[in-house]
Image: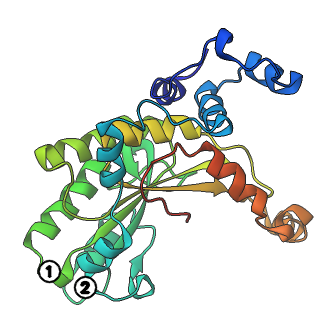
Amino acid sequence: MPNKGSALLAKKLPRRSREQAPANQSSANAARMAVRGPHAGLEVLDEERERGRESEWENSGEYGKRNMQCGENLGRLLHFFGISSPLDVVWSHAVNSKAKLEAALAPGSKTMFLEADVTWGSCGGVRNLAVMAHPPRTSSDLTFLMFFSRVVEHNRKASHNRRVGVKLDFKDGRCLESCLGLLRDTAGANESVGFPVWLNADVWSGPGARPPSMAPADFFAACFDMYPAGTLSPGWTCWLKFEGPSDAASRLLDPAVLQGYEMQHIEDALRTLPRGVGHVTFP
């Protein structure tokens, strides 16, 4: 059975009946269509591309609306920060604690974009909620609610050149509903929280890496349905956990790692991106 994310994407695209299938369809393609994997929605998207047919959703007003909403484009991003080049953006990475967050937002800080990791864990005595931490660490002194509320407060009070954007690196799919729901509720009728939000998750397998824990269809569907104003920033898993110094040294000599990314990684990724998603960044 397709998973929830696949179903959400698939329902946006019209399915063609068996009677509509071309008579000269190759046996290989017929076999591929007959045997559905766990992400059937992605196969539907690919079949639409192969046939050169646009979906009913893409021809609707909702498609145009989401295409315009889905992300801060480059021009708006530069305008928001008052800069002339994206190379001028100053980042603070791994802002996963109260101390790092306050340092990035402090007077005199040059930070423009906060990159933070979101996983499922605990904060204090509270368990099973979205917190700011990078696995294998799953505890933090900063929940996602605390993190995001502080950023919203800062941006409301800050001068134009002191506002910040956020890039959220989702490490666990269980965080999506509560976190994206908070973005949606904060945006309200404005449909945007008023500052750049990049939504990141490693949904593809990179060189020498384990399969991702989050399916592309699940991530994209959640983003589209709950916060379409965000900029999609999907990525690849690209490294295995080191067990020790000797293992780290051997991994550096691994041909799969030395080879790095190939064009095939990009092409495979593009095939799973629904058409008309607006602006997408590759981290």
Rounded to the nearest angstrom, the CA distance separating label 2 from label 1 is 8 Å
In the displayed structure, 128 sits above or below 21; it is below
Disc on res. 160: 1
In the displayed structure, 246 sits above or below 106; it is above
- Image quarter of residue 185: top left
Check the image and name the residue furthest to the left: 157
- Report whether 225 appears left or right of 283: left
Question: Does residue 99 show up?
Answer: no
Give the foreground label among 2 and 1.
Answer: 2
- Residue at the (33%, 75%) spot, across then down: 75
Question: Does residue 228 show up?
Answer: yes
Q: Which of 18 and 266 is in front in this view?
A: 18
Q: How far across and how far down the image is residue 184, in percent?
A: 23, 43
Q: What element carries label 1?
A: helix
**Residue holding disc 2:** 82
- Report whether 40 appears left or right of 90: right
Q: How far across and how far down the image is residue 101, in percent?
A: 30, 69
- Image quarter of residue 73: bottom left
- Residue at the (77%, 57%) spot, across then down: 264
